[in-house]
Amino acid sequence: MKNSPSIEEQLEMHRKMVVVRRLEERLGDLHKAGKTRGPIHRCDGQEAVGVAATAMLGTGDFVTSTHRGHAHYIGKGVGVKGVAAEILGRATGICGGRAGHMLIGDKDKGMIGGNAIVGGSIPAATGMALSIQVRGTRDVAMCFFGDGAAQTGICHESMNIAGLWKLPVVFVLEHNQFGLTVHHTVQSPVADLSIRAAGYAMPSEIVDGNDATAVYRAVAVAVERARRGEGPTLIEAKTYRMQGFSTSDMGGYQAEADLAEWSRRDPITVSRAALVEAVGADRLDAVEREAIAEVEVAIDEALAAPLPSFEIFTNSAPYAQAV
Amino acid sequence: MAMMRYAEALNQALREEMQRDSNVFLFGEDIGRYGGVFKVTRGLMDEFGESRVRDTPISEQTLAAMAVTASMTGTRPVLEIMYADFMPLVLDALINQASIYEYLWQNVTMPFVLRTQGGGGAGAGAQHSKSLDSLVAHIPGIKVVAPVTPADAKGLLKSAIRDSQPVVFLEHKLLYNLRDEVPEDPDFTIPFGTAKTVREGSDVSIFATSRMVLESQKAAELLAAEGIFAEVIDLRSLRPLDIDAITASIARTHHAVVVNEGWRFCGYAAELSATIMDYAFDDLDAPVMRVTLPDMPIPYSEPLELAVLPNATRIADAARAALK
């Protein structure tokens, strides 16, 4: 099928999803052991969206993320060691411990970056797309945002401007069913938020967000369209948040039946089933072992790394004056 | 030097910087085909085209957030927000976005300019007359300037566009028609953080912002007739602040009046007063006097509006009180 990932690309997506899953599981354990600081927003079950949607992008393409961005970071190529160390507040973190897990940015990888003001990623990518259009390059901007963020005013404003100016932006709506604890049916009168795209004169597509290949195909079409200067696309990836809002979530509002059903359709299970015939169980096992080992090393190194020391930030006159 | 109005000086600065750097572009409401409701961008769409001069939908919150990230990715956007009263709509982009990334990520720069205009005196009512300087000057990492003369308007706007950090550029609706000499050198710029002494004096220092500089100059005339010699300092740059100019003036006069058209409580004048206490307390012979808008909405009808706006009479009264 056109725009399908190659087997090697699928395998790489599979590897990255396993990296993210292991990272989330280890962070959950470390939180319980009192070794993390502040809330951590895990994306277990949503890995296919972030990993597959970024798989066809280059480092010149920009991605903006959310407070639940680990799959976006790893998908866009930010190193797992720097990410793990940042989440654990270490001096070796990708942002030196200044940012924390919600605000990771890595300009060299085009990931700028996490954004924990819900909806903030949407105008952020739209502004990058404006920059691309003014400079006349073929890069694209992509934002991830959830069904909660889709209810913000800036979501409407951004999509209107992007549609009006045919900006090279791909809006990836990661529909995980919940805005914090509130189910999407209590936040919007429509189940399929992408029907709004018609109001902004842009195409849209609903995809199974737990199927990496399906996400890849839909996003690849949108990215090519943006590169050709034909404007934005809204991709609505239906998925499900398997963990709570954050590590501080006490739960109790997610239906057991839903959890069981979405667990059956776990994106890593889906990906493994799609690949096993082509590459064999042995190779998949090896790839998964390697991915898990990479995370273990990253976490161990981060835990052994020094905490940062505070230095007055003298690189910038207004900041320096303010300290 | 050429004689021109404040609005024309701004227009010239924009034109020169757009000619100098193809990554400079303008966007905002009514700025393109119409040339801006205060005529600052007149003719620029014809000269530079519709990609670099863009009329926008009424979406301030998003436009400001877009300026932040467009500036992070290779362009130098200049966004016009039509009234300073609309600044609350863009505060998330300034406070939660622009303010943080240079610290968190360090290898990013955000060379954007957010132009807006505020101030009372035009009968525009409670939602189109305010000076909200303290809202933006409060934010670490954001520079804030407020030029009074056409020359300063041009030189500071050119500096703002060339700067690698976010700049909020505060104009005043009653200054656009002010005419004066403006340097024509295309590299004429004015560094941030430099105040300007507009009248020398020995008895009391009046530190003012934006149009209040003109009222302070009038106040100094009133005081001179009584034998009181006031020094008037146009701060020009609200952040960074020229603390050396402030302390040097107080070291001469030992009395200080601060004037700002915004609200009093937690206002920009309050910050000036506290800064003077931090840096010049030992040189003061009397408490710092503040002249501001009272803490209330700006009324519409002329006598009501004039009753609340700070003016020369009130500034002179404050100076006399400081000297009492």
Image: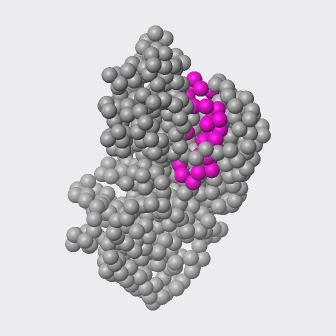
- At 44% from the left and 44% from the top, the residue drawn is B243
Give residue B77's position: percent from left, percent from top: 62, 47
Q: Is residue B99 above or below residue B181?
A: below
Give residue A82's position: percent from left, percent from top: 43, 73
- Report whether residue B137 is seen: no
Give residue B201's position: percent from left, percent from top: 48, 29
- At 65% from the left and 68% from the top, the residue drawn is A2
Image quadrant containing the N terminus of chain B: top right
Residue A269 occupies which quadrant of the picture? bottom left
Give residue A12's position: percent from left, percent from top: 52, 78
Nearer-the-camera pick, A130 or B227: B227
- Report whether residue B252 is seen: yes
User: In the drawing, does residue B196 fall left or right of residue A17?
Assistant: right
Nearer-the-camera pick, A38 or A42: A38
Bounds of the magenta span?
B148-176
Residue B316 occupies which quadrant of the picture? top left
Q: Is residue B300 above or below residue B31?
A: above
Colouring of the image: one colour
Q: Residue furthest right?
A: B47
- Total count of labels: 0
User: In the drawing, does residue B234 fall left or right of residue B188?
Assistant: left
- At 69% from the left and 60% from the top, the residue drawn is A138
Nearer-the-camera pick, A4 or B285: B285
- At 32% from the left and 76% from the top, the residue drawn is A306
Residue A201 is covered by the magenta coloring = no
Image quadrant containing the C terminus of chain B: top left
Q: Residue furthest bottom?
A: A282
